[in-house]
Amino acid sequence: MPWSCRRALAVLSMVALSGSALLGSGGAARAAGDADRGKILSYTCLGCHGIDTYKNVYPTYSVPALAGQHPEYLLAALKEYRSGERSHATMHVQAQSLSDQDMEDIALYFAGQVLKPGATPVGTAPDKVAQLCVSCHGKEGVGITGDYPTLAGQHADYLARALEEYKKGDRKNAIMASFAGGISDAEIGQIAQYYSKQVPPLRTEPRRVTILSAQ
Ligand code: HEC
Ligand code: HEC
């Protein structure tokens, strides 16, 4: 769909949404004000992040699930795409047109019900997870603070891709580069499988179905 057309749809859905927001109770709508704005702004994101089976085309790997993620991490990720610190052509374009405030609102909306540490781990953690990863990502895959992304239930192929990118230096982060450097390709596969099976999992954002988006 051409960009101008998407913009028009986004504006139309904004009108539709603000109409329905007016019907809700004034107090509640106010408390969730930023996430509500994020919901409107994130309309175009759901073409990829709102479909559970959606894949990045080349190379092929799943689009990450965002619901339940720490909003602080989502915000940091969007800023990294905008600055180019984290390279991905599509996400760079997506992030480029967003202000800091837009990003905060979107991060809050996408995070939704944030996963909390403390769930019972599923299966036996691979040795490297127990030795190297749990201090930040937990055994059950929930980032211990908002700076550390939650991995629980994330698509295994996306987790593996992220680790390979840290290892190769395509994704730049000093902390993760040092940890990823110490694990083999086979271990990456096991670690990605382990974290992807943890529950409760990160989820794909439910896609709003309206007359405008049902296609
Ligand atoms: C054309 C598909 C597509 C669209 C549209 C899209 N994304 Fe993404 N998004 C991706 C892919 C693919 C990745 C993983 C990129 C990578 O490997 O770094 C990603 C990654 C992300 C991440 C990082 C998640 C993590 O765990 O590190 C965030 C946050 C994100 N997108 C938010 C958004 C927002 C907000 C929008 C709308 C403004 C958006 N995306 C639109 C495909 C898309
Ligand atoms: C000292 C804290 C720390 C430790 C230990 C650590 N990480 Fe991370 N991890 C981070 C931070 C911070 C990020 C976000 C970096 C960025 O912005 O790219 C991250 C990002 C990730 C991501 C990308 C998530 C996403 O949504 O894109 C994966 C996968 C990951 N770590 C796996 C691991 C594994 C596996 C280990 C153990 C081998 C590990 N980490 C050890 C801090 C840590």
Image (cartoon, rainbow, N blue to C red):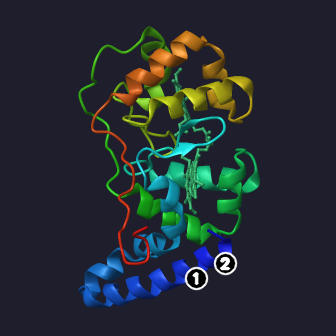
Q: Is residue 6 left or right of residue 53?
A: right
Q: Is residue 24 left or right of residue 5?
A: left
Task: Find residue 61 and report its horizontal and vertical position in percent.
Answer: 55, 36
The one nearer the camera, 34 or 63, is 63
Residue 4's disc number: 2
- Mark 1, Cα crowd under 10 Å, few <14 / some 14-19 / many 20+, is few
Task: Find residue 87 and report its horizontal and vertical position in percent.
Answer: 72, 44
Q: Is residue 10 above or below residue 148?
A: below
Q: Are the residues flagged by discs 1 and 2 in contact, CB closer than 8 Å?
A: yes
Q: Residue at x 27, y 38 (%)?
A: 200
Q: As shown in the figure, which amino acid type bears the numbered disc 1?
A: Ala
Q: Residue at x 47, y 30 (%)?
A: 136
Of the four image quadrants, the one with ligand 2 is: top right
**C-alpha span from label 1 to label 2:** 6 Å
Q: Is residue 130 above or below residue 111?
A: above
Report which quarter residue 154 is drawn in. Answer: top left
| Screen quadrant of the C terminus | bottom left
The one nearer the camera, 138 or 153, is 153
Q: Secondary structure at mark 2?
A: helix
- Mark 2, Cα crowd under 10 Å, few <14 / some 14-19 / many 20+, is few
Residue 185's disc number: none
Question: For disc 2, does the CB lie below 8 Å from ligand 1?
Answer: no
Q: As shown in the figure, which amino acid type bears the numbered disc 2?
A: Ser
Task: Write down the residue under mark 1.
Answer: 8
Q: Is residue 144 left or right of residue 121?
A: right
Task: Find residue 106 and report its horizontal and vertical position in percent.
Answer: 50, 65
Q: Residue at x 41, y 55 (%)?
A: 111
Task: Find residue 197 and report its horizontal and vertical position in percent.
Answer: 33, 28
Q: Is residue 84 left or right of residue 69?
A: right
